[in-house]
Image (cartoon, grey):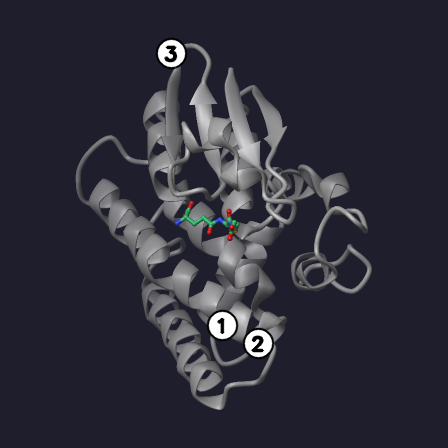
Amino acid sequence: MIDLYYWPTPNGWKITIFLEEAELPYRLVPVNIGRGDQFKEEFLKISPNHRMPAIVDTDTGESVFESGAILLRLAEKTGKFLAAEGAERTAALEWLFWQVGGLGPMAGQLSHFTNYAPEKITYALERYANEYDRLISVMERRLKQTEYLAGAYSIADMAAWPWVKPHEAFGQSLDPYPSVKRWFEAIRQRPAVQRGLEVGKDLSKPGQMDEEARRILFGQKGQGSA
Ligand SMILES: N[C@@H](CCC(=O)N[C@@H](CS)C(=O)NCC(=O)O)C(=O)O
């Protein structure tokens, strides 16, 4: 059994999407990041960077933090969504590390300066909007050549997709990027992805989650596809 320390945000969805795709049994342990659960002593023992997601594999007692490391560990545990060896495995790891080192942090900063900063700082907004746009254009070049980031659908797509999902809330259109749009729609329609996005949605009820975060993640009424 996997215990998933979770709150419904893009980094959390990466893992619920994997668990739903792989049909791996799991138990949800909510980490209310608006209330500060991520700083609790007990949580720091498994996630020293005080960020969610994290997992504990209750079969082995092993804990893992960082979404990329979790995806890699779960892919190895199940033998799913990551080629065992060869060029396709290397490509999946390239695009997984590209996401955790690039797309995720840049999108996170863009979201912060667009939606949360107390003042609009043009330099910061332009810097992160340009960088997000550049990273989407990098995906476009890749997805012109391959159906998914590593060829077959893999943990690299599960890492990247949740950070493309809120593109509208970041002021970004996918219209100039037809291959990203095709990839985005194909993944959006996967039943396991839809189930993954539903996980813990009730946690985001008014009062549980910051209103601005709710709007960005779920749309105006806590629904939709921000
Ligand atoms: N590099 C980390 C980032 C995780 C992360 O930033 N999680 C956010 C939610 S999406 C969080 O826990 N934030 C709590 C805080 O900012 O204190 C990963 O990929 O797992």
Going from the N terminus, do you reach mark 3 or mark 1 first? 3
Which residue type does callout 3 highlight?
Answer: Thr
Residue at the location (49% across, 35% down)? 18
Give the x, y percent position of residue 63. 39, 24
Q: Which mark is residue 134?
A: none
Residue 33 seen in render = yes
C-alpha distance separating marks 2 and 3: 42 Å
The label number, if any, that marks residue 114 in the structure image: 2
Q: Secondary structure at mark 3?
A: loop
Q: Could you tell me which quadrant the C terminus lies in?
A: bottom right
Q: Does residue 149 lie above or below 113 as drawn?
A: above
Q: Which mark is residue 110?
A: 1
Relative to the observer, which residue lies in front, 156 or 86? 156
- C-beta proximity under 8 Å, tags 2 and 1: yes
Q: Is mark 1 within 8 Å of ligand 1?
A: no
Q: Residues within 10 Å of mark 3 (few under 14, many from 20)?
A: few
Q: Residue at x 79, y 49 (%)?
A: 207
What whole-number distance in Å separates the C-alpha atoms at marks 2 and 1? 6 Å
**Can see residue 17?**
no
The image shows a total of numbered marks equal to 3
The answer to whether the residues at label 2 and label 3 have Cβ atoms under 8 Å apart is no
Real-space CA distance between mark 3 and mark 1, rounded to the nearest whole angstrom: 38 Å
Along the line of sight, the residue nearer the viewer: 88 or 212: 212
- Residue corresponding to mark 3: 60
Q: Check disc 2 and give the amino acid type.
A: Thr
> In the rendering, at what x and y percent does residue 2 appear?
50, 21
Q: Give the side of residue 116 with respect to residue 106, left or right.
A: right
Amino acid type, residue under disc 1 in the picture: Leu
Which image quadrant is residue 218 in? Answer: bottom right
